Image (cartoon, rainbow, N blue to C red):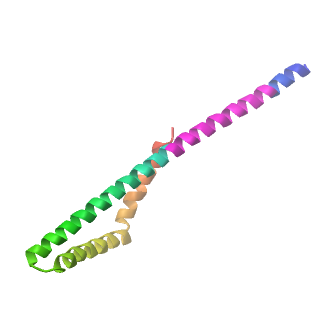
Amino acid sequence: MPNAIGNYIRNIFEYVEVKFERLKLKTISKVAKVASILISLGLLLIIIFFVVFFLSFGLASLLNDILESSYLGFLIVSGFYIVFILIVFILFRRKIIQNFFESLLIKLIESFKE
């Protein structure tokens, strides 16, 4: 009888250990997925930043040539970005963009549930 109780207790400990190991592996897998998504998104944002930067610089230079000015093209492009930022700020104030990103994040989190 004491041997059976010892086996039962050992089996319980092994079961808990296996469950804990499984939970640990699932957590590592989910963290790796989230990290890979964040790294990919970060790299994509960096690439987009450089593309927009060089296109803006090229457009400003082209406008400078067209307007025969050394600075008006840069002012026009800067004004465009100021208007763009104001529009984005107004949309964030109305929470249109924020709601979009919240729903996107919720979908991302729910996709990890199994």
Q: In the shown orientation, is residue 76 left or right of residue 109?
A: left
Whether residue 26 is in magenta: the answer is yes
Inspect this view and state whether residue 77 appears. Answer: yes
Kindly indicate the quadrant of the structure image that contains residue 46: bottom left
Relative to residue 104, is residue 114 drawn left or right?
right
Residue 94 percent coordinates (x, y): 36, 70
**Main structural element of the magenta stretch: helix, strand or loop?**
helix
Quarter-of-image position of residue 63:
bottom left
Which percent across, then down, holds residue 81? 26, 72
Q: In the rendered view, does 40 fall on the left or right side of 18?
A: left
Q: Does residue 107 appear to the left or right of 82 in the view shown?
A: right
Extreme right residue here? Answer: 2
Q: At 13% across and 70% down in the image, what residue appears?
A: 62
Inspect the magenta stretch and tell me whether residue 24 lies in it: yes
In the rendered picture of this protein, how many numbered marks are placed on residues? 0
Q: Quarter holding the N terminus? A: top right
- Residue 18 image-quadrant placement: top right
Residue visible at 80% across and 27% down?
Answer: 10
Location of residue 94 with respect to 110 vertically, above or below: below
Horizontal and vertical percent position of residue 108: 44, 48
Read off the magenta span. 10-32
Query: Who's the residue at 49% across and 48% down the image?
Result: 35
- Is 58 above or below relative to 82? above
Give how far across and how far down residue 76 sits, in percent: 19, 77
